[in-house]
Image: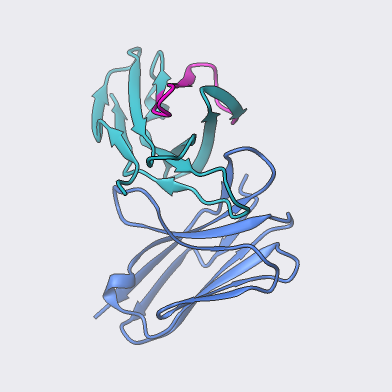
Amino acid sequence: TQLLEQSPQFLSIQEGENLTVYCNSSSVFSSLQWYRQEPGEGPVLLVTVVTGGEVKKLKRLTFQFGDARKDSSLHITAAQPGDTGLYLCAGATDSWGKLQFGAGTQVVVTP
Amino acid sequence: KAGVTQTPRYLIKTRGQQVTLSCSPISGHRSVSWYQQTPGQGLQFLFEYFSETQRNKGNFPGRFSGRQFSNSRSEMNVSTLELGDSALYLCASSSTSGTRYEQYFGPGTRLTVT
């Protein structure tokens, strides 16, 4: 059972379009991470958000943490083929060393 | 700073055999967590080690075990392999200092059980 629900599961867009991925939970997290994973590789950390309402920007990527620290979103502006990958959100609680992962959103950006 | 390394990258085993996977964390990181990733279940937490002690364990059978050495390197062992153990096994290290908790993953070990 996934405590973190990601939507959509799959997203296929053209280069230059915008996209948003959502991560929702009924649980409160002390922090939330977003990762991108390529096939056969480990997830690569993109950002960590800690404070409710926090917004972080990483070039064309914008991450937001909900006020209640239960949900988050990732927005990509003017997507490029290099943005293709599996995007995973993961929440940290007070459980040592354990991140709760969402099922992931597969993003495909075609030229 | 070198990232998390995992060996081997690929492994093929037969049902009933056992396997040992190795993970070297980022220098200075003392916490190592292990995850199993499958298409159907996503990333599932196996266990976490800190200072050679297992602090947390996920819902996996006792066939899955691990340990951590004094240099923070970690190994996980799976005994009596089953077909369903085929997965990407990921190790992640983290620093326990500061208020921001972040895990950095290795490239994983792809285990195929035939």
Q: Nearer the viewer, residue A48 or B72?
A: B72
Q: Residue at x 62, y 44 (%)?
A: A1
The image quadrant that residue A78 belongs to is bottom left
Looking at the image, which residue is at 34% across and 20% down? B20
Chain seen in cyan: B
Along the line of sight, which residue is nearer the eye, B108 or A58? A58
Q: Which residue corresponds to the image point at 39% horizontal and 52% vertical from the top-left?
A: A43
Q: Position of residue B11 (x, y in %)?
A: 25, 28
In the rendered image, which quarter contains the C terminus of chain B?
top left
Magenta run includes residue B60: yes
Q: In this picture, which residue range is highlighted in magenta?
A: B57-75
**Front one among B50 and A31:** B50
Q: How is the image coloured?
A: by chain
How many circles with numbers are drawn on the protein?
0
Say if the magenta span includes residue B63: yes
Does residue B27 sit above or below A58 in this rendering? Answer: above
Residue A101 higher or lower than A57, as above or below? above
Residue A109: percent from left, percent from top: 32, 75
Residue B41 visible in rendering: no
Residue B61 is situated, as x and y percent measured from the top left of the image, at 55, 20
Q: Is residue A40 visible?
A: yes
Residue nearest the observer in this picture, B49 or A26? B49
Q: Which chain is blue?
A: A
Q: Measured along the vertical axis of the image, is residue B16 above or below residue B108?
A: above
Query: Residue at coordinates 68% horizontally, 55% vertically from top-left?
Result: A30
Residue B106, image x, y percentages: 35, 43
Asked where in the image residue A49 lies, by quadrant, the reply is bottom right
